[in-house]
Image (cartoon, rainbow, N blue to C red):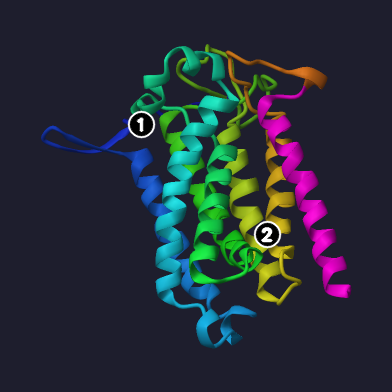
Amino acid sequence: MLIHPQINPIALQLGPFSIHWYGLTYLAAFALFMFLGIRRLRHEPFASIKGAGAWSRKDVEDILFMGVMGVVLGGRIGYCLFYKPAYYLAHPLEVFAVWQGGMSFHGGMLGVIAAMIWFAVSRGKPWLQVADFVAPCVPTGLAAGRVGNFINGELWGRLSPPDLPWGMVFRGAGDLPRHPSQVYQFLGEGLLLFVLLWLYARKERKQGQVAAAFLLGYGLFRFAAEFFREPDAFLGILSLGMSMGQWLCVPMIVGGVGLWWWAQRRSAR
């Protein structure tokens, strides 16, 4: 078995100011989005749109800014509502204590959806066209976030078989080896989802189908990864033997299938 390397979460100390590795992974995620978004401008249908509805580098910059706000606000509010609603109802001021940790991907995704709607309305673009543009640029940011989780030694996996070669002992999680679920998620919902979605989006699809593929793909990869990830201690396993993460993935999977089918039927009509 392996021992998790005790990496200092602070990457750089400048006097009283600390730069954390996790913060750097967020910066990497935003930089990757910008890089991929500029390349996405060359894909159809965006490359062929002219006039008032044309896409430009300024659009990528603006949607990134709005998306960052959506990730931070939605991620924090989602964590408070989905995971500890009673606690934060009793301690409302601690909702703003983001330095204590606590972010939800599914809440962040809802925040990004709200940001995309805001962007679409303000720029006069179809919302599903905006969602199709953004979707392939997201998984690399998710991969960067899982790197941060691994560096911090957090969100570790469930107990692994003693003879699993890559089973890892995490500090604070006891002396038994566990699945490095952060690595599983980095590879699945991060790199593999990016490759599949980027290749799928290279060819022009029915409006809404690229966004649908993201919902379906992320939902499936995250649902599978949750079988290896230790559930939150204050929640444990919920009904039907599923974790909170799996329950939150169910509407994503259903929504992805439904959106893809609707986009196909809408185009046929």
- The image shows residue 139 at horizontal and vertical percentages of 57, 53
For label 2, the SS is helix
Quadrant that contains the N terminus:
top right
Which amino acid type is shown beneath numbered disc 1? Ile
Q: Which residue matches tag 1?
A: 7
- The image shows residue 208 at horizontal and vertical percentages of 71, 64
Query: Who comes first in sequence, dot 1 or dot 2?
Result: 1
Q: How many marks?
A: 2
For label 1, the SS is loop
In the image, is 232 to the left or to the right of 57? right
Q: Which residue matches tag 2?
A: 211
Q: Quadrant of residue 165?
A: top right
Q: Residue at x 31, y 30 (%)?
A: 8
Label 2 CA crowd tier, 10 Å (few <14, some 14–19, many 20+): many
As for residue 13 lying within the magenta part, the answer is no
Residue 156 visible, this orientation = no
Q: Is residue 74 above or below residue 167?
A: below
Q: Nearer the viewer, mark 1 or mark 2?
A: 2
* Span colored in magenta: 242-269
Choose between 11 and 16: the one closer to the eye.
Answer: 16
Q: Residue at x 70, y 51 (%)?
A: 215
Tell me whether circle 1 and circle 2 mark residues in contact (CB < 8 Å): no
Choose between 143 and 237: the one closer to the eye.
Answer: 237
